[in-house]
Amino acid sequence: MADDADEADALRRFAATGRKLLSGDDAVSTHTDFEVWDETVGSWIDKAAPGSGLSAEWSSISSSSLVVAGGYYNDPRIWAGFKEGVQQRLRWLSTLPGRLDEERRRRQTATAARPPLAVPWSVLRSVLSEHFAFSDIKVIVGLTGIDMTALHHLEQTTERSATNSQLLSAIDRLFGELDAAEQERFVRVTAEEVLRRRSGLAARLGEYLSRLGWAIHQGSIVPVDLLDVSELPELPAAAREDLVKGAIRLRDGDLGGALTAACGAVDAATAEVYQQAGLGSPGSASFQERVTRSLKALDVVKRQETALASLGWKANELKMLSQNLAGALNQAAFVMQSLRSNMADVHGTRPVLRPLVFDSLKWAALIVRLLGTT
Protein backbone atom coordinates (compact mmCIF):
# COMPACT_ATOMS: atom_id res chain seq x y z
CA MET A 1 0.00 0.00 0.00
CA ALA A 2 1.11 3.57 -0.64
CA ASP A 3 2.50 5.78 2.13
CA ASP A 4 -0.27 7.83 3.79
CA ALA A 5 1.20 11.25 2.89
CA ASP A 6 1.94 10.23 -0.69
CA GLU A 7 -1.53 8.71 -0.96
CA ALA A 8 -3.27 11.88 0.19
CA ASP A 9 -1.19 13.99 -2.19
CA ALA A 10 -1.94 11.68 -5.12
CA LEU A 11 -5.68 11.75 -4.43
CA ARG A 12 -5.64 15.55 -4.27
CA ARG A 13 -3.90 15.69 -7.65
CA PHE A 14 -6.36 13.22 -9.17
CA ALA A 15 -9.32 15.25 -7.88
CA ALA A 16 -7.80 18.51 -9.19
CA THR A 17 -7.36 16.94 -12.64
CA GLY A 18 -10.99 15.85 -12.63
CA ARG A 19 -12.24 19.31 -11.68
CA LYS A 20 -10.14 20.79 -14.46
CA LEU A 21 -11.78 18.41 -16.95
CA LEU A 22 -15.18 19.82 -15.96
CA SER A 23 -14.13 23.23 -17.30
CA GLY A 24 -12.69 21.90 -20.57
CA ASP A 25 -14.02 23.38 -23.82
CA ASP A 26 -11.86 21.78 -26.51
CA ALA A 27 -13.11 18.31 -27.38
CA VAL A 28 -9.80 16.84 -28.59
CA SER A 29 -7.54 18.07 -25.79
CA THR A 30 -10.15 17.38 -23.10
CA HIS A 31 -10.68 13.84 -24.43
CA THR A 32 -6.91 13.26 -24.39
CA ASP A 33 -6.61 14.64 -20.86
CA PHE A 34 -9.46 12.37 -19.76
CA GLU A 35 -7.72 9.26 -21.14
CA VAL A 36 -4.46 10.25 -19.41
CA TRP A 37 -6.41 10.79 -16.17
CA ASP A 38 -8.05 7.39 -16.45
CA GLU A 39 -4.72 5.63 -17.12
CA THR A 40 -2.77 7.54 -14.45
CA VAL A 41 -5.28 6.88 -11.68
CA GLY A 42 -5.74 3.24 -12.76
CA SER A 43 -1.99 2.60 -12.72
CA TRP A 44 -1.64 4.24 -9.31
CA ILE A 45 -4.44 2.09 -7.88
CA ASP A 46 -2.81 -1.07 -9.30
CA LYS A 47 0.32 -0.22 -7.30
CA ALA A 48 -1.52 0.95 -4.18
CA ALA A 49 -3.91 -2.02 -4.03
CA PRO A 50 -2.69 -4.79 -6.34
CA GLY A 51 -5.17 -7.54 -7.09
CA SER A 52 -8.08 -5.65 -5.48
CA GLY A 53 -9.99 -5.00 -8.70
CA LEU A 54 -10.35 -1.32 -7.78
CA SER A 55 -8.54 -0.09 -10.89
CA ALA A 56 -10.93 -2.03 -13.14
CA GLU A 57 -13.87 -0.58 -11.22
CA TRP A 58 -12.42 2.92 -11.72
CA SER A 59 -12.08 2.52 -15.47
CA SER A 60 -15.58 1.06 -15.84
CA ILE A 61 -17.38 4.09 -14.37
CA SER A 62 -17.59 6.17 -17.54
CA SER A 63 -15.88 6.88 -20.84
CA SER A 64 -15.42 9.87 -23.12
CA SER A 65 -17.46 10.24 -26.30
CA LEU A 66 -15.89 13.56 -27.20
CA VAL A 67 -13.70 11.80 -29.76
CA VAL A 68 -14.89 8.64 -31.50
CA ALA A 69 -13.17 6.92 -34.44
CA GLY A 70 -10.99 9.95 -35.08
CA GLY A 71 -13.89 12.41 -35.15
CA TYR A 72 -14.61 14.93 -32.39
CA TYR A 73 -18.04 16.05 -31.20
CA ASN A 74 -18.89 19.44 -29.71
CA ASP A 75 -22.56 18.60 -29.29
CA PRO A 76 -23.86 20.00 -25.95
CA ARG A 77 -25.48 16.67 -25.13
CA ILE A 78 -22.12 14.88 -25.56
CA TRP A 79 -20.46 17.44 -23.29
CA ALA A 80 -23.20 17.06 -20.69
CA GLY A 81 -22.79 13.27 -20.67
CA PHE A 82 -19.02 13.62 -20.49
CA LYS A 83 -19.14 15.98 -17.51
CA GLU A 84 -21.67 13.77 -15.69
CA GLY A 85 -19.22 10.87 -16.15
CA VAL A 86 -16.36 12.96 -14.72
CA GLN A 87 -18.53 13.91 -11.74
CA GLN A 88 -19.28 10.21 -11.15
CA ARG A 89 -15.56 9.50 -11.14
CA LEU A 90 -14.92 12.37 -8.71
CA ARG A 91 -17.57 10.96 -6.37
CA TRP A 92 -15.93 7.54 -6.67
CA LEU A 93 -12.52 9.06 -5.87
CA SER A 94 -13.99 10.55 -2.68
CA THR A 95 -14.72 6.99 -1.47
CA LEU A 96 -11.30 5.62 -2.46
CA PRO A 97 -9.45 6.34 0.84
CA GLY A 98 -12.00 4.22 2.72
CA ARG A 99 -11.82 1.50 0.08
CA LEU A 100 -8.04 1.42 0.35
CA ASP A 101 -8.24 1.19 4.16
CA GLU A 102 -10.67 -1.71 3.77
CA GLU A 103 -8.28 -3.43 1.38
CA ARG A 104 -5.43 -2.98 3.87
CA ARG A 105 -7.48 -4.57 6.63
CA ARG A 106 -8.48 -7.43 4.34
CA ARG A 107 -4.87 -8.16 3.46
CA GLN A 108 -3.73 -7.90 7.07
CA THR A 109 -6.48 -10.26 8.21
CA ALA A 110 -5.67 -12.76 5.45
CA THR A 111 -1.97 -12.62 6.34
CA ALA A 112 -2.64 -13.05 10.06
CA ALA A 113 -4.99 -15.97 9.37
CA ARG A 114 -2.40 -17.87 7.39
CA PRO A 115 0.67 -19.30 9.15
CA PRO A 116 3.80 -17.81 7.52
CA LEU A 117 5.78 -20.27 5.44
CA ALA A 118 8.90 -18.53 6.67
CA VAL A 119 8.61 -20.77 9.75
CA PRO A 120 9.08 -24.13 7.98
CA TRP A 121 11.66 -22.54 5.66
CA SER A 122 13.73 -21.54 8.70
CA VAL A 123 13.76 -25.20 9.76
CA LEU A 124 14.69 -26.44 6.29
CA ARG A 125 17.36 -23.76 6.11
CA SER A 126 18.97 -25.04 9.31
CA VAL A 127 18.88 -28.62 8.02
CA LEU A 128 20.48 -27.57 4.73
CA SER A 129 23.19 -25.65 6.54
CA GLU A 130 23.99 -28.51 8.90
CA HIS A 131 23.78 -31.53 6.59
CA PHE A 132 24.37 -30.41 2.99
CA ALA A 133 27.35 -29.13 1.06
CA PHE A 134 27.33 -25.82 -0.80
CA SER A 135 26.86 -27.44 -4.22
CA ASP A 136 24.04 -29.69 -2.95
CA ILE A 137 22.15 -26.71 -1.55
CA LYS A 138 22.35 -25.00 -4.93
CA VAL A 139 21.04 -28.09 -6.70
CA ILE A 140 18.16 -28.51 -4.24
CA VAL A 141 16.92 -24.92 -4.38
CA GLY A 142 17.39 -24.92 -8.15
CA LEU A 143 14.79 -27.67 -8.39
CA THR A 144 12.21 -25.43 -6.70
CA GLY A 145 12.08 -23.12 -9.71
CA ILE A 146 13.67 -20.19 -7.88
CA ASP A 147 15.60 -17.62 -9.94
CA MET A 148 19.09 -19.12 -9.90
CA THR A 149 20.53 -16.22 -11.91
CA ALA A 150 20.34 -14.21 -8.70
CA LEU A 151 22.77 -16.70 -7.13
CA HIS A 152 25.22 -17.03 -10.02
CA HIS A 153 27.81 -14.83 -8.32
CA LEU A 154 28.00 -17.21 -5.34
CA GLU A 155 30.50 -19.92 -6.19
CA GLN A 156 33.20 -21.98 -4.51
CA THR A 157 36.21 -21.80 -6.82
CA THR A 158 39.90 -21.05 -6.52
CA GLU A 159 39.18 -17.38 -7.32
CA ARG A 160 36.20 -16.93 -5.03
CA SER A 161 34.86 -18.95 -2.12
CA ALA A 162 31.35 -18.16 -0.92
CA THR A 163 30.16 -19.84 2.27
CA ASN A 164 26.98 -21.79 3.01
CA SER A 165 25.86 -18.89 5.18
CA GLN A 166 26.25 -16.40 2.32
CA LEU A 167 24.38 -18.68 -0.06
CA LEU A 168 21.50 -19.26 2.36
CA SER A 169 21.24 -15.54 3.12
CA ALA A 170 20.86 -14.86 -0.60
CA ILE A 171 18.20 -17.59 -0.79
CA ASP A 172 16.41 -15.92 2.17
CA ARG A 173 16.08 -12.74 0.13
CA LEU A 174 14.71 -14.62 -2.87
CA PHE A 175 12.25 -16.53 -0.67
CA GLY A 176 10.93 -13.29 0.77
CA GLU A 177 10.11 -12.05 -2.75
CA LEU A 178 7.97 -15.10 -3.62
CA ASP A 179 4.19 -15.00 -3.43
CA ALA A 180 2.25 -17.48 -1.27
CA ALA A 181 1.88 -20.12 -4.00
CA GLU A 182 5.57 -19.89 -4.93
CA GLN A 183 6.61 -20.14 -1.28
CA GLU A 184 4.46 -23.25 -0.87
CA ARG A 185 6.11 -24.86 -3.89
CA PHE A 186 9.57 -23.83 -2.70
CA VAL A 187 9.06 -25.30 0.78
CA ARG A 188 7.41 -28.48 -0.53
CA VAL A 189 10.06 -29.25 -3.17
CA THR A 190 12.90 -28.43 -0.77
CA ALA A 191 11.45 -30.79 1.85
CA GLU A 192 10.94 -33.54 -0.73
CA GLU A 193 14.51 -33.21 -2.04
CA VAL A 194 16.05 -33.10 1.44
CA LEU A 195 14.29 -36.33 2.39
CA ARG A 196 14.97 -37.97 -0.96
CA ARG A 197 18.69 -37.40 -0.51
CA ARG A 198 18.81 -38.01 3.24
CA SER A 199 15.83 -40.13 4.29
CA GLY A 200 17.40 -40.56 7.71
CA LEU A 201 16.67 -36.90 8.42
CA ALA A 202 12.89 -37.45 8.42
CA ALA A 203 12.59 -37.92 12.18
CA ARG A 204 14.83 -34.97 13.00
CA LEU A 205 13.09 -32.69 10.51
CA GLY A 206 9.72 -33.73 11.91
CA GLU A 207 10.94 -33.01 15.45
CA TYR A 208 12.22 -29.55 14.51
CA LEU A 209 8.95 -28.69 12.76
CA SER A 210 6.74 -29.98 15.57
CA ARG A 211 8.42 -27.61 18.05
CA LEU A 212 7.11 -24.73 15.96
CA GLY A 213 3.63 -26.15 15.38
CA TRP A 214 4.19 -27.75 11.97
CA ALA A 215 4.30 -31.32 10.66
CA ILE A 216 5.46 -33.03 7.48
CA HIS A 217 3.55 -35.62 5.47
CA GLN A 218 5.01 -37.00 2.24
CA GLY A 219 6.86 -33.76 1.58
CA SER A 220 3.89 -31.51 2.36
CA ILE A 221 4.31 -29.28 5.39
CA VAL A 222 1.15 -28.30 7.27
CA PRO A 223 0.38 -26.56 10.58
CA VAL A 224 -0.42 -29.07 13.33
CA ASP A 225 -3.46 -27.04 14.40
CA LEU A 226 -5.03 -27.74 10.99
CA LEU A 227 -4.31 -31.45 10.82
CA ASP A 228 -2.50 -33.91 13.06
CA VAL A 229 -0.63 -35.94 10.47
CA SER A 230 0.30 -38.55 13.09
CA GLU A 231 -3.33 -39.71 12.93
CA LEU A 232 -3.38 -40.20 9.15
CA PRO A 233 -2.26 -43.86 9.16
CA GLU A 234 -5.30 -44.66 11.30
CA LEU A 235 -7.73 -43.12 8.79
CA PRO A 236 -9.19 -44.75 5.66
CA ALA A 237 -6.65 -44.52 2.85
CA ALA A 238 -9.19 -43.08 0.40
CA ALA A 239 -9.64 -39.98 2.57
CA ARG A 240 -6.09 -39.25 3.72
CA GLU A 241 -4.83 -37.22 0.80
CA ASP A 242 -7.98 -35.09 0.67
CA LEU A 243 -7.52 -34.19 4.34
CA VAL A 244 -3.88 -33.22 3.73
CA LYS A 245 -4.92 -31.26 0.65
CA GLY A 246 -7.59 -29.48 2.69
CA ALA A 247 -5.07 -28.48 5.37
CA ILE A 248 -2.62 -27.16 2.77
CA ARG A 249 -5.32 -25.13 1.00
CA LEU A 250 -6.61 -23.69 4.26
CA ARG A 251 -3.05 -22.85 5.25
CA ASP A 252 -2.69 -20.91 1.99
CA GLY A 253 -6.01 -19.08 2.35
CA ASP A 254 -7.96 -21.03 -0.28
CA LEU A 255 -11.21 -21.46 1.66
CA GLY A 256 -13.21 -22.92 -1.21
CA GLY A 257 -10.48 -25.41 -2.06
CA ALA A 258 -10.06 -26.39 1.58
CA LEU A 259 -13.78 -27.05 2.01
CA THR A 260 -13.97 -29.01 -1.24
CA ALA A 261 -11.10 -31.23 -0.09
CA ALA A 262 -12.63 -31.73 3.38
CA CYS A 263 -15.95 -32.76 1.85
CA GLY A 264 -14.07 -34.93 -0.64
CA ALA A 265 -12.48 -36.86 2.22
CA VAL A 266 -15.92 -37.56 3.69
CA ASP A 267 -17.28 -38.44 0.23
CA ALA A 268 -14.52 -41.01 -0.21
CA ALA A 269 -15.14 -42.57 3.21
CA THR A 270 -18.92 -42.74 2.80
CA ALA A 271 -18.57 -44.17 -0.70
CA GLU A 272 -16.65 -47.10 0.78
CA VAL A 273 -19.35 -47.65 3.40
CA TYR A 274 -22.12 -47.50 0.79
CA GLN A 275 -20.34 -50.17 -1.25
CA GLN A 276 -19.55 -52.41 1.71
CA ALA A 277 -23.00 -52.12 3.29
CA GLY A 278 -24.94 -52.29 0.02
CA LEU A 279 -26.64 -48.92 0.56
CA GLY A 280 -27.04 -48.22 -3.14
CA SER A 281 -25.60 -45.32 -5.10
CA PRO A 282 -24.11 -42.59 -2.89
CA GLY A 283 -24.57 -40.11 -5.71
CA SER A 284 -28.33 -40.15 -5.25
CA ALA A 285 -28.11 -38.96 -1.64
CA SER A 286 -27.28 -35.53 -0.21
CA PHE A 287 -24.00 -35.05 1.64
CA GLN A 288 -25.79 -34.98 5.00
CA GLU A 289 -27.79 -38.10 4.17
CA ARG A 290 -24.64 -39.98 3.09
CA VAL A 291 -22.98 -39.21 6.41
CA THR A 292 -26.03 -40.10 8.49
CA ARG A 293 -26.72 -43.39 6.67
CA SER A 294 -23.05 -44.41 6.74
CA LEU A 295 -22.76 -43.78 10.49
CA LYS A 296 -25.96 -45.74 11.08
CA ALA A 297 -24.91 -48.62 8.81
CA LEU A 298 -21.74 -49.10 10.86
CA ASP A 299 -23.50 -48.58 14.21
CA VAL A 300 -20.92 -45.92 15.01
CA VAL A 301 -22.85 -44.28 17.85
CA LYS A 302 -23.80 -47.66 19.32
CA ARG A 303 -20.18 -48.80 19.26
CA GLN A 304 -19.08 -45.63 21.07
CA GLU A 305 -21.80 -46.26 23.65
CA THR A 306 -20.65 -49.84 24.15
CA ALA A 307 -17.04 -48.75 24.57
CA LEU A 308 -17.96 -46.18 27.19
CA ALA A 309 -20.25 -48.66 29.02
CA SER A 310 -17.23 -50.91 29.45
CA LEU A 311 -15.55 -48.03 31.27
CA GLY A 312 -18.39 -47.84 33.78
CA TRP A 313 -20.55 -45.06 32.35
CA LYS A 314 -24.13 -45.00 33.66
CA ALA A 315 -27.04 -45.82 31.34
CA ASN A 316 -28.64 -42.36 31.56
CA GLU A 317 -25.30 -40.68 30.79
CA LEU A 318 -24.72 -42.99 27.83
CA LYS A 319 -28.17 -42.25 26.42
CA MET A 320 -27.67 -38.51 26.63
CA LEU A 321 -24.20 -38.68 25.09
CA SER A 322 -25.37 -40.93 22.26
CA GLN A 323 -28.22 -38.59 21.38
CA ASN A 324 -25.98 -35.55 21.41
CA LEU A 325 -23.20 -37.27 19.44
CA ALA A 326 -25.61 -38.36 16.72
CA GLY A 327 -27.13 -34.88 16.63
CA ALA A 328 -23.73 -33.17 16.52
CA LEU A 329 -22.51 -35.31 13.62
CA ASN A 330 -25.75 -34.73 11.72
CA GLN A 331 -25.50 -30.97 12.26
CA ALA A 332 -21.82 -30.93 11.26
CA ALA A 333 -22.70 -32.69 8.02
CA PHE A 334 -25.46 -30.14 7.38
CA VAL A 335 -23.08 -27.20 7.91
CA MET A 336 -20.49 -28.72 5.55
CA GLN A 337 -23.21 -29.43 2.97
CA SER A 338 -24.51 -25.86 3.18
CA LEU A 339 -21.06 -24.32 2.94
CA ARG A 340 -20.13 -26.44 -0.07
CA SER A 341 -23.40 -25.53 -1.83
CA ASN A 342 -22.81 -21.81 -1.38
CA MET A 343 -19.03 -21.51 -1.49
CA ALA A 344 -19.14 -20.90 -5.25
CA ASP A 345 -20.79 -17.55 -4.48
CA VAL A 346 -17.88 -16.45 -2.30
CA HIS A 347 -15.31 -14.32 -4.10
CA GLY A 348 -11.93 -13.84 -2.46
CA THR A 349 -10.98 -14.60 1.12
CA ARG A 350 -13.69 -13.80 3.64
CA PRO A 351 -12.20 -13.92 7.18
CA VAL A 352 -15.66 -14.57 8.66
CA LEU A 353 -15.81 -17.92 6.84
CA ARG A 354 -12.38 -19.19 7.86
CA PRO A 355 -13.47 -20.50 11.31
CA LEU A 356 -16.29 -22.45 9.67
CA VAL A 357 -13.98 -23.96 7.06
CA PHE A 358 -11.39 -24.69 9.79
CA ASP A 359 -14.08 -26.50 11.80
CA SER A 360 -15.25 -28.31 8.67
CA LEU A 361 -11.77 -29.77 8.24
CA LYS A 362 -11.87 -30.97 11.86
CA TRP A 363 -15.36 -32.40 11.43
CA ALA A 364 -14.27 -34.18 8.29
CA ALA A 365 -11.34 -35.78 10.13
CA LEU A 366 -13.68 -36.85 12.97
CA ILE A 367 -16.32 -38.31 10.63
CA VAL A 368 -13.70 -40.14 8.58
CA ARG A 369 -12.10 -41.52 11.74
CA LEU A 370 -15.43 -42.78 13.08
CA LEU A 371 -16.30 -44.41 9.77
CA GLY A 372 -12.88 -46.04 9.62
CA THR A 373 -13.05 -47.49 13.14
CA THR A 374 -14.89 -50.78 12.67
Image (spheres, rainbow, N blue to C red):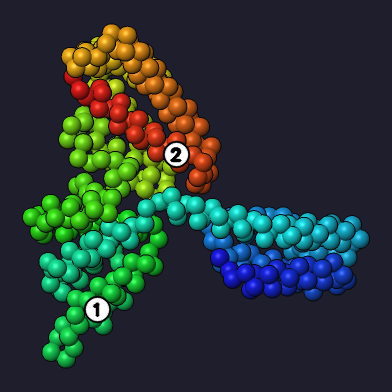
Amino acid at circle 1: Gln
Q: What element carries label 1?
A: helix
Q: Which of 100 and 209 is in front in this view?
A: 209
Q: Distance between the residues labelled 2 and 1?
A: 41 Å
Where residue 16 sits in the image (x, y, percent)? 78, 71
Residue 346 appears left or right of 210: right
Q: Residue 366 location in percent, x, y? A: 30, 28
Residue 91, visible in the rendered structure:
yes
Which quarter of the image is occupied by the C terminus?
Answer: top left
| Mark positioned earlier in the residue sequence (2 or 1) | 1
Q: Nearer the viewer, mark 2 or mark 1?
A: 2
Is disc 2 placed on a helix, strand or loop?
A: helix
Q: Residue at coordinates 23% horizontally, 50% vertically from top-left?
A: 210
Residue found farthest to the right: 76
Q: Which of 105 and 308 is in front in this view?
A: 308
Relative side of 362 to 194, left or right: right
Q: In this view, does 300 lie to the left or right of 345?
A: left
On screen, residue 219 above or below 264: below
**Residue 355 numbered tag:** 2
Residue at x 25% of width, y 72% of height: 168
Residue 365 position by quadrant: top left
Q: Establish if 190 lies above or below 336.
A: below
Please rate how many residues cluster around mark 2, counting C-alpha atoms within 10 Å: few if below 14, some from 14 to 19, many from 20: few
Amino acid at the residue labelled 2: Pro
**Dot 1 crowding, Cα within 10 Å, few <14, some 14–19, many 20+:** few
Residue 254 numbered tag: none
Write down the residue under mark 1: 166
Relative to 200, is 71 above or below? below
Please tell me which residue is depicted at 23% across the width and 61% down the height of the picture. Answer: 123
Give x and y (percent) for residue 325: 35, 19
Image quadrant where residue 84 sits: bottom right
